[in-house]
Image: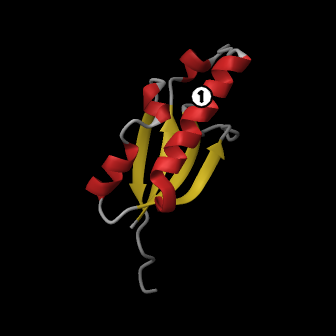
Amino acid sequence: MKYLLIYKADPAGMTGMQMTPEAIEQMNQAWMAWGEKVGSHMVDFGSPTLAKSENADKGVGGYSILEAETYEALQLLLEGHPHTAMGGEIEVHEFMPMPGM
């Protein structure tokens, strides 16, 4: 099964957030370590996103797509995720087959 992970955070807490080059490097290393842990379950590492339309959720900051046998197996892959370690929230959506296809 494929799962869409949507990374969410409080937009107010991110406003004016400045990180030192060292903190950015540490964060990037944490993301890369998580990606290595997930391994072949990674379908699309994803990227950061920026809300553009008026009705877009300003709290959405990125996404990834993973594959796992079950939702429970996915939960194991999410343990120690750098986004939640930074205080963010991960919204999970399962890809469903198109009806009639």
- Give the color scheme: rainbow, by chain, secondary structure or one colour: secondary structure
Question: Is 22 left or right of 92, judged from the image as shown?
Answer: right
Image coords of residue 26 (percent x, y): 61, 25
Image coords of residue 92 (percent x, y): 40, 49
Placement of 24 over or under 72, stated as above or below: above
Image coords of residue 15 (percent x, y): 64, 16
The residue furthest left is: 72
Placement of 88 over or under 2, stated as above or below: above
Mark 1: few/some/many CA within 10 Å (<14, 14-19, 20+)? some
Question: Is 14 left or right of 5, judged from the image as shown?
Answer: right
The image quarter containing residue 14 is: top right
Q: Is residue 57 visible?
A: no
Which one is in front, 42 or 89? 42
For the residue marked with disc 1, what is the amino acid?
A: Met
Residue at 56% of width from left, 17% of height from top? 12
For the residue labelled by badge 1, is the local secondary structure a helix, a strand or a loop?
Answer: helix
Image coords of residue 35 (percent x, y): 53, 48
Residue at 32% of width from left, 48% of height from top? 75
Residue at 56% of width from left, 47% of height from top? 63
The residue furthest bottom is: 100
The residue furthest right is: 21
The N terminus sits in image quarter: bottom left
Question: Is 65 left or right of 1, judged from the image as shown?
Answer: right
The residue under label 1 is: 27
